[in-house]
Amino acid sequence: MASEIKFGTDGWRGVIAWDFTFENVRRMAQALADYINENAPAGEDGKAPKIFVGYDRRFMSDLFAADIASIFRSNKIDVTLSSRPISTPVAACLSLNKFWMSVMVTASHNPANYNGIKIKLAGGSASSRVTKEVEEFMDQNSVLFLYGQKAEQKDLSAVYFKYVASHVNAKKLSAFKGKVVMDYMHGAAAGYLEKFIPAKQVIALRAEHDPTFGGEQPEPVEKNLALLKKTVTEKKAALGVAFDGDGDRVALVDEKGNYLTPCLIAAVLCNHLIKNKKLKGKIVQTVSMGYLLKRIARKYEMLFEEVGVGFKNVAERMGLDDVAFGVEESGGFAWKGNLPDRDGLSVALAFLEIMASTGKKASELCADVTQEYGSSVYMRRDLPLAKAVDKGVMAEKLRKKLPKKINGRRVAETLTFDGLKIIFENDEWLLLRPSGTEPLLRVYAESATKKDTQALLEFGEKLMAPYQK
């Protein structure tokens, strides 16, 4: 019996040779081909739209991508296959400018034994509606894989670099004279920063191709950034940057070697864009983000909305509403006028541009926003999940167990559309939810002090005990 294939928070992912097999990839490719042939509009010339297939540096990503492209060709779809590993933002950009859809073979930040497939439309992640429709095509038709149907291969990454260059202020960026430590985590975006910053100013770490990612998970979260922190302080660099395995997520470290949480980075970027670039519209964040952006929205009298975890939910709002700034907790940021998707390179360049234009250090920029909008200590814990759970059922059960006060704080509101988010009177919060991409439970919290945030995490961990392995 064929195994079930389902899209998670961002794409379909599985363990290589276990559920991410050539057989299953081909089944997925046929479902995608059927979806494309059913839904893709013809171009002005009456021809079928073009599809792009890209891949990252993971084990056998190039071979999986070649099979997908061949199946598209067999189904009379005009397809171009990347001739080299690329970051996911490259594929997203191509879906905005040159192709109707991009299909990317990547498992993003997952461990090395995983691989996966992401779908990009109009520059952003395919919505849940689209991925559900693709799932409905699964196994409706036998895989059509004709001999000799090889796709044309091209390196189109220059299209992306040109797009990024058109959205940064090169003059201001050239004023930045400090050193940047760039941890590529062996990912597909290796060498990208050097396209915009002189190589003599970049200290590159883990840039070489290694499908094992050096034995570490290519996720730019604090526990994986010890080398970056150490190098920043030793080399007296102005900023430390890390990208994940496919280059769409980003983490930053200030000149003192301090990890900057996504909440702080988002506040610095959003406040600057609104104050100095006069950006207008709604601020949208995933439910796993904190209160700094809510306070910025209050100050500037902007609409504020929280959506489910996964940047596809932010991207969907950006496509439907007038959104000024969108962010998710796991290092994904986007804003009006730029690519409506996560892009680690664009975020790093924007932050460097702010540093150059203000003449301030990274730590000073963060101090400015916390002085104006309040202190933010944000943390996340990942716990092993015993078995698959229904997110909605779990959230409702946990909500019913809640006391009226937690650690002396009165519960002001609860949200249950993606796990259980407990919001207190002073905007501080705790979120409990199963991951959409890994067999993990995630516990998030934010308060004004490290002690209080840790206390909230410990309470959340105890509440989640029945679901832990």
Image (tube, rainbow, N blue to C red):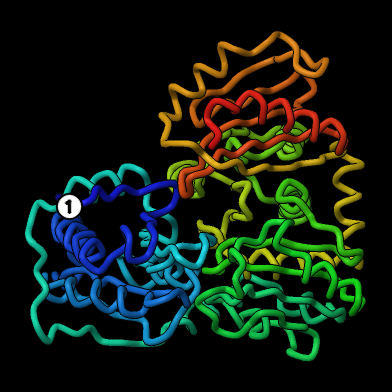
- The residue at 75%/62% (across/down) is 252
Direction from residue 308 to residue 251 in the image, left or right: right
Question: Mark 1 = which residue?
Answer: 2
- 255 displayed left or right of 47: right
Residue 257, horizontal then vertical, whole percent: 87, 64
Residue 82, image quadrant: bottom left
Q: Counting other residues with Cα less than 10 Å from the Cα at mark 1, is it few (<14), some (14-19), or many (20 or more)?
A: few
Picture layout, residue 229 above or below residue 400: below
Residue 284 x %, y % = 58, 40
In the rendered view, does 396 fall on the left or right side of 70?
A: right
Name the residue located 27 percent from the left edge and 50 percent from the top edge: 5
Quadrant of residue 216 in the image?
Answer: bottom right
Outermost front residue: 469
Q: Give the secondary structure at mark 1.
A: loop
Q: Residue at x 42, y 83 (%)?
A: 156
Relative depth, front residue between 118 and 457: 457
The answer to whether residue 226 is left or right of residue 17 is right
Q: Amino acid at mark 1?
A: Ala
User: Closest to the observer: 51 or 384?
Assistant: 384
Residue at 57% over, 40% down: 286
The image position of residue 344, as x and y in percent, is: 62, 65
Query: Looking at this rendering, what residue extends furthest in the top direction?
Result: 404
